[in-house]
Amino acid sequence: MGRIVKLGAGAEFDLIRRFTAADDALPPEVMVGPGDDAAVLQGGWVISTDMAVEDVHFRRSWISDEEIGWRAGAAAISDLAAMGAMPVAVLLSVAAPRGGSVDLAAVNAGVRAVALAHGAPVVGGDVSHSPGPLVLDVVVVGRTLWPVQRDGAEPGDDVWVTGTLGASAAAVRSWEAGGEPNAELRRSFAAPRPRVDEARALVERELVDAMIDISDGLAGDAGHLAAASGVAITLEEDRIPVAAAAVEALGPEGAFDAALHGGDDYELCFVTDPGVIDSAYFAARFGVQVTRVGYVSEGSGVWLQGPDGSRTRLERGGFDHWEGVASPEPGAS
Amino acid sequence: MGRIVKLGAGAEFDLIRRFTAADDALPPEVMVGPGDDAAVLQGGWVISTDMAVEDVHFRRSWISDEEIGWRAGAAAISDLAAMGAMPVAVLLSVAAPRGGSVDLAAVNAGVRAVALAHGAPVVGGDVSHSPGPLVLDVVVVGRTLWPVQRDGAEPGDDVWVTGTLGASAAAVRSWEAGGEPNAELRRSFAAPRPRVDEARALVERELVDAMIDISDGLAGDAGHLAAASGVAITLEEDRIPVAAAAVEALGPEGAFDAALHGGDDYELCFVTDPGVIDSAYFAARFGVQVTRVGYVSEGSGVWLQGPDGSRTRLERGGFDHWEGVASPEPGAS
């Protein structure tokens, strides 16, 4: 089965690392610099920015202008969730095509709705016309006294995910094939719900060693955790919670690929000491399934373990949409 | 003389105000919300975001990729200066055209250079390819215990500007006419220097009642101060410090128009009690001219006072590049 069309973030990670020179001295006000889901400033302020580009991350024929705003806002807020932070404020920059075809009030209403649903007003931003596609950049500011980074996974830890995976990528696949996804798939793409409350519940109980949100697909994002922590992560094939609607749309093999490599699920992948998570608690309090999907061991990379116990190393997941974009030489920055 | 071509921010202000619903309740962590140069969070954190769009704010045939980065970073940092804040950290989002024609390492190097020159490392960001033009969104985080807002101007106050005005707009005019600006004009556009140190010196001496950076032209930005403070501002025609190089390029009338209505000077316009500014101090310490350009009185709007003492109300300055972009109904948001 072919690769799911991946409009999402993809191989941006390395480029961002090169963008943000890790060797620049950080002033005392900066507690966590480049390389995590968000930067952390003195006092527990967490800040991140997330871009959504028409015809790269979404198409305007797929979802409404308000949904475009919600989705971009949710993706940005998801980075705060990944740090265990509470959203405080949002800023919205928009480059809008000339000609009036985009309803900026609706885009703004979507961002504002998802921000306010998580307690954060929109406190600023910028707006420009553009000769090109609609581009949104959503800046999120949050706060936490215990920022969860990517680098705390230790051999012996369990690896978990919230929710189910693959529905959003299945929706994209339906649209790209000229069809229309069913309501459930469509909602996964158009109206994702960032896992802020679930993340806070984990952090407040001091249960999490490392965490990331799944924007690039489970394989790729688990890979970021493994790389940052200097460990190997093994995903157990028959434990991965593939969305039933994705299976219905793509068949089991396609849905599994979507769950592993498709983006835009905005669920959390988190790492804990073994045996500390009570999944019934999450089901009861948040109505959300949490699933242990694998384990941490010494080594490196992300591995897929079949039902027979055999392990295969996964290549970097995700469609590299950076082909053809000039990128700095490794280490240049 | 025709209107200076204005690629700058223009009439974005009203749209941002509508974007950011001033009637949303602000949580206790947000001290200053929508409507100023930047938002202010508890603890004196100041945050702003500024977008630069190819063929709207700049053309790639005019300046290098590194200059594009510097200029976008400087414009964003200028908003911190306008609040009297010290830069702490910068985040950079980039949407880059496919095909490799943009050197992202150079763009990043430009942003990083201007950020580090003001003490702020680049701590994060996002990057995507795009089917459209190069778009940068620069997020700046700063800090100050005394944020200077726009609403403190009082009748009887003096109105001042740093530096000279009109050179950046004159450079744009040269390029748009098919020529090449001289080195001084070019530098004004390509490598503006945000007035962070000058603003800090003003704030530390508690000299400033209100301040804004001049990104939309003196007339427009003085208009923002007047509107926020509920006063009238009168600019004295023969006191406005028109850049000599702009006069050389455009003649006195064209240069005056560029100074009044052209954008992208990134100087400061500030309001003080009468007689408190020692311009010799600024010349000696910063090598920067500061000029009293007018005064505050009761009323509203921005007025131009001729050498004979007659006053003319200025229409809103700036070229409205929002024509054709759907905008929300006033008050909608």
Image (cartoon, coloured by chain):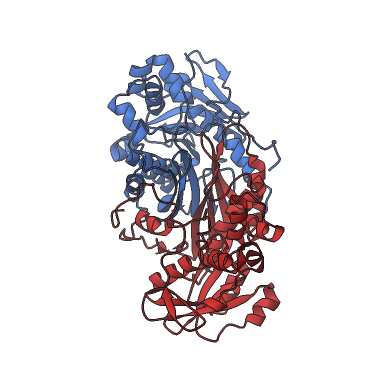
Chain colours: A red, B blue
| The quarter of the displayed image where residue A312 is located | bottom left
Position of residue A181 in the picture relative to residue B258 (left or right): right
The answer to whether A37 appears left or right of A327 in the picture is: right
Q: Is residue A301 visible?
A: yes
Residue drawn at x 46%, y 30% is B263
Residue B182: percent from left, percent from top? 29, 24
Residue placed most toward the observer, B96 or B332: B96
Q: Is residue A267 above or below residue B16?
A: below
Which residue: 49% across, 46% down?
Answer: B49
Task: Identify the residue at the far bottom of this view.
Answer: A275
* Residue under the image location 67 percent in, 38 percent down: B328
Q: Quadrant of residue B27?
A: bottom right
Any part of residue A120 in sight:
no
User: Residue A97: x percent and y percent?
Assistant: 56, 36
Question: What is the x, y in percent for residue A281?
Answer: 66, 80
Of A158 and B34, the residue lying toward us: A158
Counting the numbered discs, the total is: 0
Locate residue B200, reporting x and y percent. Answer: 40, 46
Q: Is residue A70 left or right of residue B105?
A: right
**Image quadrant of residue A17?**
bottom left
- Whether residue B282 is situated above or below residue A181 in the rendered picture: above
**Who is closer to the viewer here, B329 or A19?**
A19
